[in-house]
């Protein structure tokens, strides 16, 4: 969940840092601007980082702590770049630009994959949603349709037992449909 | 006819309740749709506005002058918001007016852009380049968002059509053929279970479709109506066939 939230706003945060730093704003001021809000979980993390800094913690230590907490690869890369900049005064602009391009490419790929993955969703839902009520409908009707076939088929369960089977079966079908649809949520590229 | 219809529904108290909930929630779904249309209109215009502003600054104008020119040229909501902000800046400060505009836009993208413009201004940044870069970025982002919308819309509607309309009609036909009322079979229990199943399945499919398009919260309002529609198709379909 955290990884998804990090990825959602990461590209905007990198672009914002890039724009601010290319226009001569320092890393700390850029962090402060991002912490001001608008970048979801990244803004929250940066706010905490500033609070820690105000309590006397060094910026590089606060960034390193955040690196341990981060879940997504891209966010970790961004924090590493920031850490290196603070520690060794590296050229952060070029790295940020490359990271943003890579992140953008990844987002486009994720989006394409999401569209492709969900393309088959209507058919999957229809298949499970159709087969199950047809079969269970026949099971529900069985005691009445084959009421006189006891000699051949043996004793059929009572109507109420059959109805309970139908209820449980359809309940499981609903859960199955919800699980199939869950990928619309879990694979969301955050665009 | 109406009395017959009500007589049929009398066996399904949940449907009667759902009719009331559907009527109440139908109206609730309209404001999120209007709000989204407004927000997307603003967001789709960001790229053009930034490009225009970049050109104006490149021509030697200041940021306020450039924004005033954008407000003159654009006769959409974005132009109006900028115009209002420029008016307000005469009474307050430029930064306060822009911050107010960001809040009024109710769009995260617009708020980010304004925040970046203000930060870049404070840092004495080369605004023409900054604005041009941002315009390109937001153009790409909005294209991607629109792509998601157009490409997934058909799948989303197909899900609702299949599960909410086709499925109950087919099953109603099947049960109506196998166990018509005239045959004396007792299928009241089965019909009731099936009707609630279709209500539940349609509710799930509406939520999935909404999530696919990234607007589950606003589609949530239409869950009772679609569920009711699907249940009615099954019940009335069965009555008709049998």
Image (spheres, coloured by chain):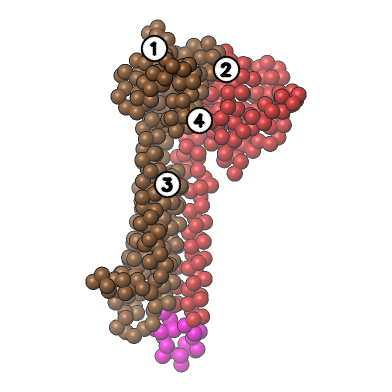
Chain colours: A red, B brown
Element on which disc 3 rests: helix
Q: Of residues A98 and B89, which is closer to you in this image?
A: B89
Q: In which quarter of the view is residue B206 placed? A: bottom left
Let me know if marks 1 and 2 both belong to one chain: no
Q: Pick whichever of labels 2 and 4 is earlier in the sequence.
A: 2
Marks 1 and 4, how far apart in space? 33 Å
Marks 1 and 3, how far apart in space? 39 Å
Does residue B129 show up?
A: no
Does residue A43 show up?
A: yes
Q: Of residues A80 and B97, which is closer to you in this image?
A: B97
Q: Which residue is mark 4?
A: A104
Let me know if marks 3 and 4 both belong to one chain: no
Element on which disc 4 rests: helix
Q: How many C-alpha atoms fall within 10 Å of the one at disc 3: few (<14), some, or many (≥20)? A: some
The region drawn magenta spans A141-159
Q: Which residue is mark 3?
A: B218
Q: Which residue is mark 2?
A: A21
* CB within 8 Å, label 1 to label 4: no
């Amino acid at each position: 969940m955290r990884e998804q939230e990090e990825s959602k706003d990461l590209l905007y945060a990198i672009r914002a840092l890039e724009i601010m730093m290319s226009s001569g704003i320092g890393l700390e001021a850029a962090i402060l601007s991002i912490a001001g809000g608008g970048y979801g979980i990244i803004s929250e993390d940066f706010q905490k980082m500033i609070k820690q800094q105000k309590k006397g913690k060094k910026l590089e230590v606060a960034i390193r702590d955040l690196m341990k907490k981060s879940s997504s690869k891209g966010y970790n890369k961004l924090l590493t770049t920031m850490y290196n900049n603070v520690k060794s005064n590296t050229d952060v602009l070029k790295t940020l630009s490359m990271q943003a391009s890579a992140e953008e490419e990844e987002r486009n790929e994720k989006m394409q994959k999401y569209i492709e993955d969900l393309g088959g969703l209507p058919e999957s839902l229809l298949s499970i949603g159709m087969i199950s009520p047809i079969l269970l409908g026949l099971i529900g009707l069985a005691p009445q349709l084959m009421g006189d076939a006891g000699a051949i088929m043996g004793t059929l369960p009572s109507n109420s037992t059959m109805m309970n089977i139908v209820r449980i079966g359809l309940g499981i079908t609903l859960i199955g449909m919800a699980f199939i649809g869950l990928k619309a949520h879990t694979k969301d590229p955050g665009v | 006819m109406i009395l017959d219809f009500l007589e049929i529904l009398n066996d399904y108290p949940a449907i009667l309740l759902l009719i009331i909930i559907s009527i109440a929630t139908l109206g609730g779904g309209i404001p999120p749709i209007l709000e989204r249309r407004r927000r997307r209109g603003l967001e789709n215009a960001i790229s053009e506005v930034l490009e225009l502003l970049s050109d104006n600054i490149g021509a030697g104008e200041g940021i306020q002058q450039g924004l005033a020119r954008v407000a003159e040229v654009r006769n959409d909501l974005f132009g109006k918001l900028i115009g209002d902000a420029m008016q307000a800046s005469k009474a307050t400060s430029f930064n306060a007016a822009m911050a107010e505009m960001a809040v009024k836009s109710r769009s995260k993208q617009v708020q980010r852009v304004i925040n970046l413009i203000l930060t870049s201004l404070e840092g004495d940044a080369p605004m023409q380049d900054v604005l041009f870069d941002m315009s390109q970025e937001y153009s790409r982002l909005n294209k991607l968002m629109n792509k998601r919308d157009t490409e997934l819309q058909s799948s989303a509607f197909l899900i609702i059509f299949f599960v909410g309309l086709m499925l109950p009609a087919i099953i109603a036909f099947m049960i109506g053929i196998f166990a018509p009322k005239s045959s004396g079979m007792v299928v009241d229990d089965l019909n009731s279970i099936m009707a609630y199943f279709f209500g539940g399945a349609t509710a799930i499919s509406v939520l999935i479709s909404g999530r696919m398009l990234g607007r589950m919260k606003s589609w949530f309002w239409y869950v009772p109506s679609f569920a009711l529609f699907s249940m009615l198709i099954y019940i009335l379909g069965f009555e008709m066939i049998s």
